[in-house]
Amino acid sequence: MSTATLDRASIERLVRAALSERTGNGDAAPANRLRQMPGHTPKLVVNVSARHCHVTQEDLERLYGKGHKLTPYKPLYQEGFFAAEETVTMIGPRHRTITGLRILGPCRDHSQVELAFTDAVMLGLDIPVRKSGDHRDSPGAYLLGPAGMIHMERGVIRHERHVHMGPTDVAHYGVKDGDRLHLRIDSDCPTVLESLLVRFSPASKLEVHLDTDEGNACHINRATRFELFK
């Protein structure tokens, strides 16, 4: 039986012929692989939310006068929300105060103060970690404005770390409202923050909210990469 040695060119022709039979075109396989690649990863924004408060329209009028409306100072990342010109003084149980506490708008159906733990310790408050609007077992405080004062019986919380998501974001990460994700932060103080609450809204843009304690702990100003994962 005779044998023959195939040269490189012959081998390449045989490989191209085999590919052509399987795909209908020897050049089609790479294009098919490209079409099957996952879609573009959504833009992930991570922002530090400094201490602030939300107020009802009724409480705003007690603080600033009858008929007063919030004046936008700076738009926030989520469309329709803004930091207002208006600020208040918060008075804690030890008569210690936080001045210039920014109100965020628009007005809500409940008044609420969101602090980091270091803020609460300074004021002498023991605050729980809660989702916005969950005020159970939370302390209250006095808020002082130029026209008057209000007494919140409860509503001072540390807003738990969370991520806002819209429809394409929940689909990309395979989650729903109320689920949990972890956040990896690469910086000169790398950190993984666990159990971020997923908050879904049809109009939301993908954005993580941390407080100042969390932002300082991971040196977020030096962060080079963020990653959300299950």
Image (cartoon, grey):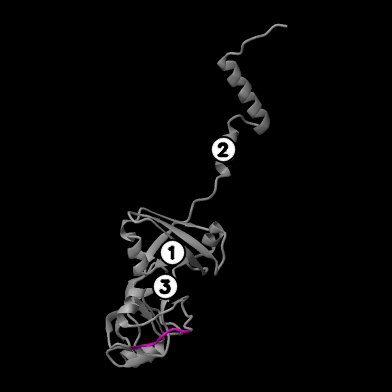
**Amino acid on which the number 3 mark rests in the picture:** Gly
Task: Give yes or no for contact between labels 3 and 1 (Cβ–Cβ under 8 Å).
Answer: no
**Earlier sequence position, callout 3 versus callout 2:** 2
Real-space Cα separation, disc 3 to disc 2, in angstroms: 42 Å
Real-space Cα separation, disc 1 to disc 2, in angstroms: 34 Å
Residue at 30 percent across and 93 percent down: it is 148
| Disc number for residue 146 | none
Place of residue 58 in the rendered image (x, y in percent of width and height, measured from the top left): 40, 90
| Disc number for residue 207 | 1
Query: Which region shows up in magenta?
Result: 137-142
Tell me the element at label 3. Answer: loop
Residue 74 appears anywhere in the view: yes
**Earlier sequence position, callout 3 versus callout 1:** 3
**Amino acid on which the number 2 mark rests in the picture:** Ala
Residue topped by disc 3: 80
Give the residue furthest to the right. Answer: 1
Is residue 112 placed above or below 79 in the rendered structure? below
**Earlier sequence position, callout 1 versus callout 2:** 2
**Amino acid on which the number 1 mark rests in the picture:** Glu
Q: 58 left or right of 12?
A: left
Tell me the element at label 1. Answer: strand
Query: Quadrant of residue 27 in the image?
Result: top right
